[in-house]
Structures are given as C-alpha cells and as structure tokens.
Image (cartoon, rainbow, N blue to C red):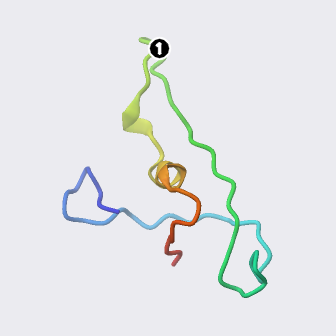
Amino acid sequence: GENPKKPGSAHAVRLYSIASTRYGDAFDGKTASLCVRRAVYYDPETGKKDPSKNGVCSNFLCNSRPGDKIQLI
C-alpha cells in the first residue's frame, strides 16, 4: 500500500514470523493461515483513540476479507 506519511511511496518492509506449515493449508505450498489482532491505542490523557499509532500491516490485514489475495514477499 501507499505510505500516507510519504505520498507516492510504498510502506517500509516489515518482517513477521508466521507459524504455519511450509506446505500450506491446502498442502500445495501456496497458502497460509494468519492470526492477526487489530491493536487500538488510546491517548492516556484524553482517553480517545489515537489513530496515529495504528499498525499498518495489522490494520491492512484486518480490513481484508476472506479470500482476498495478499502478496507475501
């Protein structure tokens, strides 16, 4: 996706560990299951959500729907 802090540029690469069999869910080596939690941060002074601290990848994945194709590099 596009980096909202730097329009026209991609987000920085992020590294994650995925606990999934190397053969994938369909045993074809082309699928994986992910368990992702959307983290919501609150400003301790105001008690309001602080969207500036939303996780880029976790929110992207949480906004995706089952069956969406997501490229893993």
In which quadrant will I find the N terminus? bottom left
The residue beneath circle 1 is 47
31, 48: nearer the viewer: 31
Image position, residue 22 (x, y; %): 76, 81
Give, as a three-letter code, the residue at label 1. Answer: Gly
Residue in view at x 41 percent, y 28 percent: 50
- Residue at position x 52%, y 33% from top? 40
Please report the residue visible at 31 percent of the width from the left and 66 percent of the height from the top.
10
Q: Is 51 drawn above or below residue 24 in the view shown?
A: above
Image coords of residue 37 (percent x, y): 63, 45
Q: Is residue 69 above or below residue 7?
A: below
Element carrying mark 1: loop
Seen in the image, is 38 located left or right of residue 44?
A: right
Outermost residue on the top side: it is 46
Q: Position of residue 43 (x, y in %)?
A: 45, 20
Q: Residue 54 appears in which quarter of the rendering?
A: top left
Image height of 18 relative to 30, above or below? above
- Quarter of the image holding residue 24? bottom right
